[in-house]
Amino acid sequence: MAFCAKCGTSLAEGVAFCPSCGTPVGTTPSGSATAPPTGARPMASNVAGLIAYLAGFITGVIFLVIEPYKNDRFVRFHAFQSIFFSVAYLVIRMAWHMIFGVLFLASWGLMWPVISLSWVVVRLGFFVLWLFLMFKAYNNERFMLPVIGDLAARQAG
């Protein structure tokens, strides 16, 4: 497969110019078209900030260790906030399950519908907040959650 040296678009055999950017197609000494550029443009900070929330602490940690995002304060902030948000969700989830177990046993299962419905509401709230944080990151806004945001800002520098 041949690629444009300027924009990386795949090229059909025998074309003289890139159909995307119009750059003349060069060939290597072996006669094949050049490979895509190795130093491809990194994604914008707002997209990296959004992606930092996608898989919670996993993508947060990834963006804290890969270049050039580990030096971008905006991406670092959202990566740390993603990590802390994920940890807070896991802690609340574990506490909720312990409380659910005690209330279920104490009420002989009669409180199960109320407890289950309230857990659905809590999970829905976390999901909406997660979407909101991704929206704010994509719009280049540094939205800080009350406690988690302060911790993330201190860690990001």
Image (cartoon, grey):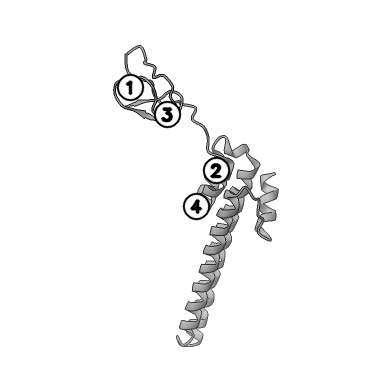
- Of circles 4 and 2, the one toward us is 4
Residue hosting label 3: 8
Residue hosting label 2: 63
Q: Nearer the viewer, residue 43 or 121?
A: 43
Looking at the picture, how far across and down is residue 49, in whole percent? 57, 47
Q: Quadrant of the N terminus?
A: top left
Q: Are marks 1 and 3 in contact (CB under 8 Å)?
A: no
Residue hosting label 1: 15
Separation (CA) of disc 1 from disc 3: 14 Å
Mark 2 surroundings: few (<14), some (14-19) or many (≥20) residues within 10 A: many
Label located before the other in sequence (4 or 2): 4
Q: Amino acid at mark 1?
A: Val
Q: Secondary structure at mark 1?
A: loop
Res. 110 visible in picture: yes
Residue hosting label 4: 54
Q: Quadrant of the C terminus?
A: top right
Q: Secondary structure at mark 2?
A: helix
Label located before the other in sequence (2 or 3): 3
Label located before the other in sequence (1 or 2): 1
- Image point 64% across, 50% down: which residue? 141
Q: Secondary structure at mark 3?
A: loop
Q: Amino acid at mark 2?
A: Phe
Can you tell which quarter of the image residue 146 is in? bottom right
